[in-house]
Image (cartoon, rainbow, N blue to C red):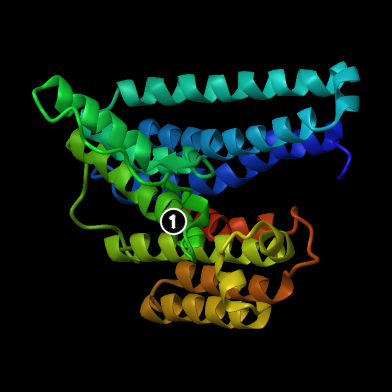
């Protein structure tokens, strides 16, 4: 078992969640500006998207590291390691407060939209028992005059979102891509500031498809890095199901190329797709986690380019 160090805790509990959330920052800034009728930024969807990303990833990493910390009795004698978990909980609490503040300034539809995309991310590795739902429903039926003598379920059925075959990366793309679009749209629509026509070269379809496919492809590429671990743990990611890193990279290349060709008139999407494709072949199982941060920002760099050219 790898030794838990302060550097690893700082990376997993703080640096990586913040670094990954910067892509959500870039995407939400872009969408907030181009979808706004007056062209101004709205802080609410940006705050919601960034803090939600930090909470989802940070909570997942915190859970993993707490299990790793408690599995080694030697860690109990190191108060410095224990203090980093306090810092991480404080960081997540502050993010939750900011999220609640932003949601309190939005219509109820934004709260429901955010919950739709954030809850699956928070429950990413949590076993969901269908027997519990059945027990609750039977009790409610009994309380309101239903049959109190229904037979119990034969066996316990649980669902772990992360372990749905081949769907981990797709769910990731929907949550981090299409989810950002729907949150921005909900906030702007609720304030009457949603435009019907986006500035050139953008369109609603471009924003949805580009962001969703890019996030799904990035998640699949990180699964290439974790292929050996996922095989041992039995996590049915796309690379595991295909049984080949080469096949996975060919499919990722095809996805990026199809998006580029579909929106060839947009130089920012074209550049992003070409950059993402290059990273598909540059990164692999032996690349460091920090190297994969480039893939997570294959959109961010070109969003910054667009924003700079717009204001220069």
Identify the residue at horizontal 27%, vertical 45% (top origin): 185
Task: Count neighbours of disc 1 (C-alpha within 10 A) and say few if under 14, some if 14 to 19, many if 20 or more.
Answer: many
Identify the residue at horizontal 58%, vertical 83% (top origin): 250
Whether residue 283 sits left or right of residue 304 in the image: it is right
Residue 289 % position (x, y): 74, 54
How many numbered marks are there? 1
Secondary structure category for the residue under label 1: helix
Whether residue 95 sits left or right of residue 34 in the image: it is right
- Label 1: which residue? 171
Q: Is residue 209 above or below residue 312?
A: below
Q: Is residue 42 above or below residue 103?
A: below
In depth, the one of 7 and 131 nearer the eye is: 131
Whether residue 183 sits left or right of residue 167 in the image: it is left
Q: Is residue 309 visible?
A: no
Identify the residue at horizontal 31%, vertical 38% (top origin): 152
Residue 183 % position (x, y): 32, 42
Q: Quadrant of residue 293?
A: bottom right
In depth, the one of 63 and 115 nearer the eye is: 63
In depth, the one of 272 and 57 nearer the eye is: 57
**Can you say which quadrant of the picture contains the N terminus?**
top right
Which residue is at the far left?
A: 145
Q: Is residue 89 visible?
A: yes
Residue 75 % position (x, y): 87, 25
Q: Quadrant of residue 18?
A: top right
Whether residue 249 sits left or right of residue 136 in the image: it is right
Residue 3 % position (x, y): 89, 39
């Amino acid at each position: 078992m790898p030794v838990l160090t302060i550097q690893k805790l700082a990376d997993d509990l703080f640096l990586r969640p913040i670094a990954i959330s910067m892509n959500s920052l870039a995407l939400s800034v872009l969408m907030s500006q181009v979808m706004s009728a007056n062209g101004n930024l709205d802080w609410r969807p940006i705050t919601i998207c960034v803090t939600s990303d930090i909470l989802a990833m940070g909570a997942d990493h915190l859970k993993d590291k707490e299990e790793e910390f408690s599995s080694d009795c030697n860690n109990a004698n190191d108060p410095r390691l224990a203090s980093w978990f306090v810092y991480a909980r404080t960081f997540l609490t502050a993010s939750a407060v900011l999220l609640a503040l932003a949601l309190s300034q939005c219509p109820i539809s934004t709260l429901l939209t955010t919950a739709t995309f954030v809850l699956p991310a928070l429950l990413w590795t949590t076993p969901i028992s269908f027997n519990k739902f059945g027990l609750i429903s039977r009790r409610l039926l009994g309380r309101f005059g239903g049959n109190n003598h229904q037979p119990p379920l034969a066996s316990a059925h649980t669902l772990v979102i992360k372990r749905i075959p081949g769907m981990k990366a797709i769910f990731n793309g929907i949550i981090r891509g299409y989810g950002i679009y729907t949150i921005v749209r909900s906030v702007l629509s609720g304030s009457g500031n949603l435009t019907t026509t986006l500035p050139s070269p953008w369109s609603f379809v471009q924003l949805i498809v580009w962001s969703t496919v890019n996030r799904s492809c990035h998640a699949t590429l990180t699964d290439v890095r974790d292929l050996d671990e996922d095989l041992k743990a039995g996590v049915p990611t796309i690379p595991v199901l295909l049984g080949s890193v080469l096949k996975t990279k060919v499919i990722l290349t095809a996805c990026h190329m199809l998006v580029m060709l579909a929106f060839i008139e947009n130089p920012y999407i074209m550049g992003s797709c070409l950059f993402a494709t290059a990273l598909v072949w540059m990164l692999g199982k032996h690349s460091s986690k920090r190297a994969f941060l480039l893939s997570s920002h294959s959109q961010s760099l070109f969003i910054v380019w667009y924003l700079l050219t717009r204001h220069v």
